[in-house]
Image: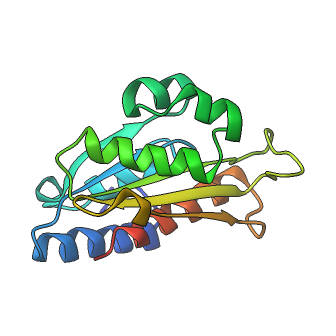
Amino acid sequence: MTMHCLLPAPLCDLARRVIAENSAIGRTVAVAESCTGGLVAAALTEVPGSSAVLDRGFVTYSNEAKTEMLGVSEDLIDTFGAVSIAVAWSMAQGALHRSKADVAVAITGVAGPDGGSENKPVGTVVFACAKRGEDPEATNAELKVFDEAQTRAEVRYEAAMTALALLLP
């Protein structure tokens, strides 16, 4: 059996673009993942030459991991919830500060099928992208609701695709 990519082709294709375009400008990246559980890092490492671009990935699935590995404040999590603009922003800043990367993307969300609420239904995912040397106030954070996604796998796939797109120069 010959396999060229373990993951869905569109995910691998986008990861190839991320590696090629960042490599061309000498830019390195880091990822801080929660609901995607390392899927973004896995997609990036499917690409030959990814070691020149991917500095590191943080899989911070638990709130404790977000605090310990990325320096996200417990108060922030308690006040806004793990799936929030504030926490995604803090995760991206933490990944940037705890790596040598030029840009860091963070993903936190509710993949389902459980865990959703009226305010944060299943499919709610928050993304943040921080760049080294940029004013932290300029860090872009955005909440998306993938309400077309029918399954946990679909939410995670859509989240990974969005995160990869944020890593394009």
Q: Is residue 9 at all visible to an observer of this figure?
A: no
Residue 55 is left or right of residue 164, and the answer is left
Residue 156, x across and y down, in percent:
59, 54
Residue 113 is left or right of residue 169, and the answer is right
Residue 165, relative to residue 159: is it above or below?
A: below
Residue 98, relative to residue 17: is it above or below?
A: above
Q: What colouring method underlies this structural image?
A: rainbow
Residue 121, relative to residue 59: is it above or below?
A: below
In the depicted view, which residue is nearer to us: 27 or 72?
72
Query: Which quadrant holds residue 49?
Result: bottom left
Determine the residue positioned at 53% across, 41% down. Answer: 34
Q: Quadrant of the N terminus?
A: bottom left
Q: How many marks?
A: 0
Residue 153, x across and y down, in percent:
64, 53
Q: Quadrant of the C terminus?
A: bottom left
Residue 82, relative to residue 45: is it above or below?
A: above
Determine the residue positioned at 70% across, 47% down. Answer: 110
Q: Name the residue furthest right.
A: 118
Residue 16, x across and y down, in percent:
28, 71
Q: Is residue 94 at all visible to an observer of this figure?
A: yes
Determine the residue positioned at 37% across, 73% down. Answer: 14
In the depicted view, which residue is nearer to us: 36 or 117?
117
In the depicted view, which residue is nearer to us: 117 or 160?
117
Determine the residue positioned at 20% across, 71% down. Answer: 22
Residue 4, x across and y down, in percent:
30, 63
